[in-house]
Structures are given as structure tokens and as C-alpha cells.
Image (cartoon, helix red, strand yellow):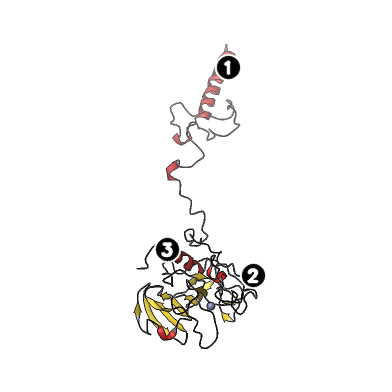
Amino acid sequence: MRAPLIFLILIILAVLALVGYNSGWFGGATAPGAGPATATNGTPSPPGVTTDPAAEPDEPVGDGGVEQLPDEAKAEPDADPVKTPDVPAAATFGHLPAGDLIPKSGSGYLDRTVWSPKLCFPFADDAFANSQVYGAGGGMGPKDHPGQCDPMNYTLPWRDNFCESRGYASPLCAVGKGHQGQDIRPATCKKDKHWVVAAEDGIITDVGTYTVTLTGEAAPHRVYRYLHMRMNQLAVKEGASVKAGDNLGKASNDFGGTPTTIHMHFEIRSGVAGTSTDGKPVVLHTFLPPYQSLVAAYDRKRAGQACH
Ligand SMILES: [Zn+2]
């Protein structure tokens, strides 16, 4: 009679042990692969002992905290930290890309910054940006086009010549030297006729033998220099205050006695230090490529936008 009783006690102990194990009494509730305990593996706690709530079998495990709601996800930072050039709207007139010089005329550059975003186009009439020296009638021009009034000088497309070969310091050009500005021919091949105008509001800070310098009134105080106007017929004097679009003088070929074609050489120099779009440092008064600013300004002019 004792054997069945002992067997019954063993079964009861085994059941209590199994329930106790799965309730975390032994601290192994979630241990993978743990088989049911036997009566000989330990002493079960007495019935009625409160189990640890943290160890409830159906308690979510693994994330260690409150679930992150989908709308709490952090926004990704801008995936494109690279500074992108300030590209003007599509041009409505024919012009070659910035840096595309006449072959073998210079070094080119990579900067595409529109350095003077509100530039007033510096001619009152239409005009043609292209090379003076390498164009028809220029010192390095095509031999079969010897005259400066050749239609090729007064025809689209425009062409950049900022980094044309010269000995002048120009750090944004590939070889560190260049022409420092853009040559622009007036609407027709007639000198002392077509008005050159102020690029922005400012002060005429210098009048030289064949140069007129305008310093922008507003920050960043860009410096514009105009060459080859008819100097004895200027509309302004040194110290004059001008508004964007005001007449400065007429396009001509004054060059202190040196021969040149009828054109206006136009420069922009920085008013503050900065960095070009291709990462080159720009210090105060660095000569800046004006072509992109001129293209955008000419687009605005052709669209009928006034300078002020
Ligand atoms: Zn020039």
C-alpha cells in the first residue's frame, strides 16, 4: 500500500516543480531549451508564493523599453550635404557654358557661382559677350576674319573669356593667371554710341585713364570695374553716387593709347572672403568669374525686368 502513495507524492511534487519552474521560481522561465524539471532537481516553493511579474512568460522581451512609434523616428539629415551651385534659370538666348573658352585661348575654371545674383546687365542695349583678343579683328583672332566689325563678333552664342591667357593674377583660373574679366561688345560695331550702365547701386570709387570703378553700396560691397569707355564723355565722376542701371559712359576703345577693339571689359571683385563652388578660397578683392552673373542678368533684361 505504501508504494502507490509514494508514487502519488512524487507525481504531485513533479507537477509542483514543473509549475514552479515555468513561473520563474527558479529564475529560468525563458531559458531556451530548458526541459521540465523533475522532482529531484530542487525544492518547489510552497503554493501561494507570488511570482515575479517581470518574468511572466508572455512578457515582451528583447527591446528593453517602450516601443518607438513610427512617427517618432528621427528625420534623416539632408542626404546631399554637398554645396550645390546657384544655377540660374534656363537661358533664353544662345550662350556657351561658363569656362568654355575658345580652344587654346586659356585655362578655364570650374567655379559656377553666380557672384552677383541681382546684377544689372551693364549695357542699356543688347550686347555680345565674347573674346576681344581671339575674336575677329583681335591680335590673336582668325586670319580670315581680320575686321572687328565682322558679323561673327556680333552674333550669338556668347562665350566666356574670364581665364583667357594673360599674365594677370587670377586665382580662380586653373593656372592662377588670366584675363580677370569678361569682354562684351555693344549692340553694334559703332563706338561712343551704346551706354554702359551701373551694375548695382553704389559709388564711383575710382576713375582712371581707361577704367571706371563702382563699389556696391550694399553688402557684400562687390567691386565692378569697367574698361575702355570714351573717357572724355563719361556721365559720372569719381565720388558720384549711382543707382543700378544709371548711365556711366559709352562703349568705346580707350586703352591709354594701346590699340584695342570696340568693347567693354567687365570685372567683378569680391567684397568679402568666401569659397567658390569648386572649393577654392576667395579672399577680399579676388577677381570673380562674371559670366554666370551676366547670363542671368541678360535673361532678366530680355524678360523685361528693370534693374530698380
Ligand atoms: Zn578684356
Q: Nearer the viewer, residue 17 or 161?
A: 161
Q: Type of residue at label 1?
A: Phe
Classed neighbour count for the residue bearing mark 1: other residues with Cα under 10 Å, few (<14), some (14–19), many (≥20): few
Q: Is residue 238 above or below residue 142?
A: below
Residue under the image location 43 percent in, 77 percent down: 193
> Which one is earlier in the sequence, the residue at label 3 or at label 1?
1
Residue under the image location 59 percent in, 14 percent down: 3
Classed neighbour count for the residue bearing mark 3: other residues with Cα under 10 Å, few (<14), some (14–19), many (≥20): many
Secondary element at tag 2:
loop
**CA separation, marks 2 and 3?**
29 Å
Q: Type of residue at label 2?
A: Pro
Secondary element at tag 1:
helix
Q: Is mark 3 within 8 Å of ligand 1?
A: no
Q: Type of residue at label 3?
A: Arg
Mark 3, mark 1: which one is toward the viewer? 3
Name the residue tied to disc 3. Answer: 300
User: CB of mark 2 within 8 Å of CB of mark 1?
Assistant: no
Residue 291's disc number = none
> Which one is earlier in the sequence, the residue at label 2 or at label 3?
2
Where is residue 284 shown, x and y percent of the image? Answer: 47, 77
Q: Quadrant of residue 111?
A: bottom right
Name the residue tied to disc 2. Answer: 103
> Which one is earlier in the sequence, the residue at label 2 or at label 1?
1
Which corner quadrant holds the C terminus?
bottom left
Secondary element at tag 3:
helix
Residue under the image location 56 percent in, 19 percent down: 11
Name the residue tied to disc 1. Answer: 7
Q: Nearer the viewer, residue 269 or 97?
A: 97
Q: Quadrant of residue 157?
A: bottom right
Where is residue 13 shown, x and y percent of the image? Answer: 54, 23
